[in-house]
């Protein structure tokens, strides 16, 4: 629109925008859907200009009616700009995702329309394409006579549409099943059930004089779209300097990124560390720095910890961490009864005072069975309790047998019940896939089963059948 242009080297030629208000032009340009560049080419010794308009046209979302009108207004603005540049004497190429299939041959199933009441050719986007593009006769076979007619066209004849040519159909007027976009949700690329919505449009003089080939590349994967390409016979004339909007001129990148090789320069490790860090008042770091600077100036009453003290503290810390890490052995332990080693509400009765027995040295019992654990395993504590006439309870823990392999899986199967097996479709006798309704309406969030095969034409036996079944809420 020119409203957002703030540099002197702009392509210009914005055309008559009288049918658009300023607010509408601002909204159409705010989404950044066009990149326009101008180049110089050498054709038969003559230097000519070519403006390339790279676009990503809006999509008409059926759930958002306002986007349909936005898309049509974007088409009108695109045509206004392209024809204005062409009128100024420069050749024009419009390429990118136009988001509308032009003819029936460009659609996998023209009868399967999103709007049943709307005929395929009555789509507003296709009506605009018929006005924007120069008419091409569809014949049974491609012949040289048709190209000769194109080369003789110097202006748009009455009734033949606009000033631009679909370069793919110019070279391949009758090729069927040539698509550039497929649905990734339904796996439609496997059955080539798609549409051709990516184009290279060129003014008819440039297409007839300089284009030598144009095609699509459906074998290139990595996206729901595939690349399209066109080849011209003219050669580019290099520019003396980059365009004003080149990244190297932006303030945040000026002087920092001059070459791509700068991305692969190994950065210094010290550069990632902060240059200075202010220690907290009274922190250990501050004390250590003070002592290192003046080790003899020790304050009275202060004592530095010895290596043995550090080892004790280290051992306590390690022991604490170890005990906390072993508090939960496995998730299965939450579902087992807890075994305690303390007998609750044990009555303490007074016994007769016995004569004091001489203290015996601690004995070791290698034949003691595993798990025979006393509450007080210290002989000194036990003698003291007996001396006071108190009866100390002793708890014996029985070791738990090791869980058999596969018992945990059986336990989880008894606790958690998985979903029921999916039904099989009636045609292919294969398990179906589970889908969820995401469109607004009464069925929002409901789940259903459909055939697991990729979407395709009804005549294709390898494509998805029409099996459909709602998921019972009780399951």
Image: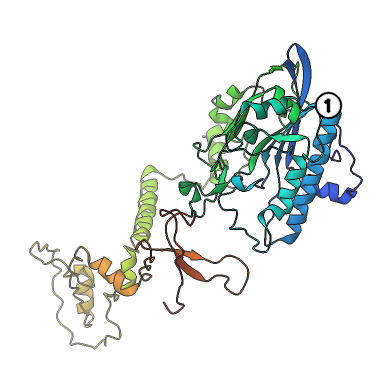
In the rendered view, tell whether residue 307 sits above or below residue 272: below
Residue found farthest to the right: 18
Question: According to the image, label 1 marks what residue?
Answer: 9
Label 1 element class? loop
Q: Nearer the viewer, residue 4 or 83?
A: 83
In the rendered view, tell whether residue 161 sits above or below residue 399: above
Percent position of residue 355, x then y: 14, 80
Quadrant location, the C terminus: bottom left
The quadrant in which residue 202 appears is top right
Quadrant location, the N terminus: top right
The residue at the point 30 percent across, 70 percent down is: 413
Percent position of residue 320, x then y: 37, 58
The residue at the point 80 percent across, 45 percent down is: 76
The residue at the point 78 percent across, 19 percent down is: 48
Q: Is residue 399 left or right of residue 176?
A: left
The quadrant in which residue 285 appears is top right
């Amino acid at each position: 629109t020119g409203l957002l242009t703030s540099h002197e080297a702009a392509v210009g030629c914005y055309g008559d925008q009288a049918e658009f208000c300023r607010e509408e032009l601002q909204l159409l340009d705010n989404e950044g859907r066009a990149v326009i560049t101008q180049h110089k080419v050498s054709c038969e010794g003559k230097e000519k200009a070519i403006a390339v308009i790279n676009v990503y046209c809006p999509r008409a979302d059926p759930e958002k009616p306002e986007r349909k009108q936005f898309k049509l207004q974007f088409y009108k603005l695109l045509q206004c700009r392209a024809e204005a540049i062409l009128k100024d004497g420069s050749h024009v190429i419009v390429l990118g995702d136009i988001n509308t299939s032009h003819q029936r041959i460009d659609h996998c199933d023209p009868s399967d329309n999103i709007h049943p009441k709307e005929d395929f050719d009555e789509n507003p986007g296709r009506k605009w394409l018929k006005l924007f593009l120069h008419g091409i006769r569809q014949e049974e076979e491609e012949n040289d006579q048709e190209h000769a007619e194109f080369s003789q066209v110097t202006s748009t004849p009455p009734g033949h549409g606009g000033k631009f040519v679909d370069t793919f159909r110019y070279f391949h007027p009758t090729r069927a099943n040539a698509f550039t976009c497929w649905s990734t949700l339904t796996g439609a690329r496997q059955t080539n059930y798609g549409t051709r919505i990516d184009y290279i449009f060129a003014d008819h003089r440039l297409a007839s004089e300089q284009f030598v080939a144009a095609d699509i590349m459906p074998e290139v994967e990595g996206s729901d779209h595939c690349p399209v390409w066109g080849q011209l016979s003219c050669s580019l004339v290099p520019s003396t300097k980059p365009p004003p909007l080149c990244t190297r001129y932006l303030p945040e990148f000026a002087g920092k990124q001059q070459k791509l090789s700068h991305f692969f320069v190994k950065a210094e490790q010290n550069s990632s560390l902060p240059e200075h860090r202010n220690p907290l008042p009274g922190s250990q770091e501050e004390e250590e720095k003070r002592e290192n600077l003046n080790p003899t100036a020790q304050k009275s009453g202060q004592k530095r910890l010895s290596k043995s003290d550090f080892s004790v503290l280290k051992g306590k810390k390690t022991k604490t961490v170890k005990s906390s890490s072993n508090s939960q052995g496995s998730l299965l332990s939450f579902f087992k009864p807890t075994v305690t080693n303390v007998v609750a509400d044990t009555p303490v009765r007074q016994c007769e005072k016995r004569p004091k027995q001489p203290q015996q040295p601690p004995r070791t019992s290698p034949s003691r069975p595993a798990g025979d654990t006393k509450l007080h395993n210290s002989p000194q504590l036990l003698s003291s309790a007996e001396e006071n006439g108190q009866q100390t309870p002793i708890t014996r823990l029985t070791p738990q047998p090791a869980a058999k392999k596969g018992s945990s899986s059986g336990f989880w199967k008894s606790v958690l019940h998985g979903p029921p097996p999916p039904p099989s479709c009636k045609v292919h006798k294969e398990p179906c896939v589970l889908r969820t309704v995401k469109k607004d309406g009464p069925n929002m969030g409901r789940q259903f089963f459909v055939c697991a095969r990729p979407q395709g034409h009804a005549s294709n036996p390898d494509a998805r059948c029409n099996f459909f079944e709602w998921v019972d809420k009780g399951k």
